Amino acid sequence: MSDQHAEGTDGGTARTEDTGTGSFDPAAPWWADLGTWGAVALVVVGGAAAGWMFLGLPGTPDTPATGYYQVAKVVAVGLVIAGTGLLGRRRERRTARGGTDTGGPERA
C-alpha cells in the first residue's frame, strides 16, 4: 500500500487492521454480522418461503418466478455466509493444531 493511500486527512496513518471491537458499521450490508447460526436461519426461512409459494398460500405473488427469485437470493446469501463461517472455523482449528492455513502441513 502506498503512503498516499495510508495517510488520513489529518496527516496521520490510517488503521488498516480490524481490532474486532464489534463496532457497528452503517455502510456494511445487512447480512454482514449474522454469523453461522444466522446463516442457517436464512436458509431455513428461505426454504419455508419456497414451500409457502409452492403450495400457493396467501401472500404468494401473481408471477411465481419473482417470488422464487427473491427466495433464492435469501437462501444463497445464507449458504455463502454459512460456508464462509464453517471454513473460517476449520482454518482456525488447523492453525491451532500447528498446520498452516493454506491447506498443507507446516514444514520447517
Image (tube, rainbow, N blue to C red):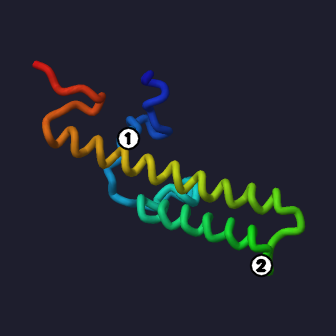
Quadrant in the picture for residue 72: bottom right
Residue depicted at x 60% and y 57%: 75
User: Compared to 4, does 68 lie above or below?
Assistant: below
**Where does label 2 land, which residue?**
57
Which quadrant of the figure contains the C terminus?
top left
| Residue found at x 33% / y 58% | 21
| Tag nearer the camera, 2 or 1 | 2
Residue 41 rendering spot, x and y as whole percentages: 50, 67
Q: Residue at x 43, y 46 (%)?
A: 84
Q: Quadrant of residue 7?
A: top left
Question: Residue 103, which numbered label?
Answer: none
> What type is the residue that disc 2 sits on?
Leu
Q: The residue tagged with tag 2: helix, strand or loop?
A: loop
In the image, farthest residue toward the front:
55
In the picture as drawn, the residue positioned furthest to the bottom comes out as: 58
Residue 80: give x, y in percent of width and height. Answer: 52, 48
Which amino acid, by three-letter code, is at mark 1? Answer: Arg
Q: Quadrant of residue 27?
A: bottom right
Measured as percent of width and height from the top left, residue 1 is found at 43, 24
- Where 15 sits versus 50, above or below? above
With 35 as the anchor, is 105 left or right in this view? left
- Tell me if 102 is positioned left or right of 7 in this view: left
Secondary structure found at label 1:
loop
For the point 41% across and 59% down, the residue is 36
Residue marked by disc 1: 15
Q: CA distance from mark 2 to mark 1?
A: 51 Å
Rate crowding at label 2 as few (under 14), some (14 to 19) or many (20 or more) other CA atoms within 10 Å: few
**Is residue 12 depicted above or below 88 in this figure?**
above
Graded by Cα atoms within 10 Å as few (under 14), some (14 to 19) or many (20 or more), the crowding at tag 1 reads few
Furthest residue in direction top, as rendered: 108
Image check: 49 left or right of 105? right
Q: Are marks 2 and 1 in contact (CB under 8 Å)?
A: no
